[in-house]
Amino acid sequence: TSLFVIEPESYRDKVESAKAQLLSAQAQLEYTQSNYERMERSSKSNAVSQNDLQQAKSAYQQAEAAVKQAKSQLDEASLNLSYCYINAPFSGQVSKHTIDAGNYLNGGETLATIYDESKLTVEFSMGYNQFANLPKPIEQITAHIVVGNDTIPAKMSYAAPSVTLQTGTLAAQAVIDNTSNKLK
């Protein structure tokens, strides 16, 4: 899903320019390759000097390098154009956007936040004694989260490697499968 489009026009122009550069470089490569191959055949009967053959080879190698450079510039221009289109990496709820059309952006600025509500992470504290009695590995443990009158199964995903000495607890996380969107 498309969220934002940020001024792609100049980047599209750069892609088109890079495509034209590549076509030009490829045409030059074809010409220099043909010229080099013809000179190479002619040099076998001494119809062409070694100096002319060497110049043709050099022009051919330069044309090969120009094609590689043009391809690289096209790749870079295409990549820069792709940054103009901000798409949601997953389905979910989108927060109110913080930037409107016409605003300038600073690097690293948050445009909006997407919340994937199909999986919810629950953070809680667990007593060390409870933790010590759990079978390992922790990812195979199902926690039971009480919400109102409901008990919801959740898969344990994390337990802190250290205990908070003041409370004798450690931080833990469990993930609830919420594909039914029962929880908000």
Image (spheres, rainbow, N blue to C red):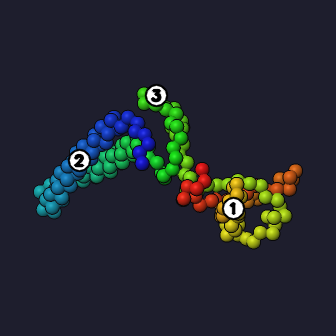
Q: Which numbered disc covers residue 37?
A: none
Report the mark closest to the observer, 2 or 1.
1
Mark positioned earlier in the residue sequence (2 or 1)? 2
Position of 75 compared to 167: left or right?
left
Residue type at the position of mark 1: Thr
Position of 119 compared to 10: left or right?
right
Compared with 32, 133 (above or below) is below
The residue that appears at 46% across and 31% down in the rendered structure is 100
The answer to the question of whether label 2 and label 3 lie on touching residues, with beta carbons closer than 8 A, is: no
Residue 160, by quadrant, is bottom right
Residue type at the position of mark 3: Asn
Residue type at the position of mark 2: Leu
Residue identifier under label 3 = 103
Give the Cα distance between marks 2 and 3: 37 Å
- Give coordinates of residue 104: x percent, y percent: 47, 28
User: Is residue 89 something one can see in this rendering?
Assistant: yes
User: Is residue 76 something one can see in this rendering?
Assistant: no
Report the mark closest to the observer, 1 or 3.
1
Position of 154 compared to 66: left or right?
right
Give the Cα distance between marks 2 and 1: 64 Å
Mark positioned earlier in the residue sequence (2 or 3)? 2
Residue identifier under label 2 = 23
Report the mark closest to the observer, 2 or 3.
3
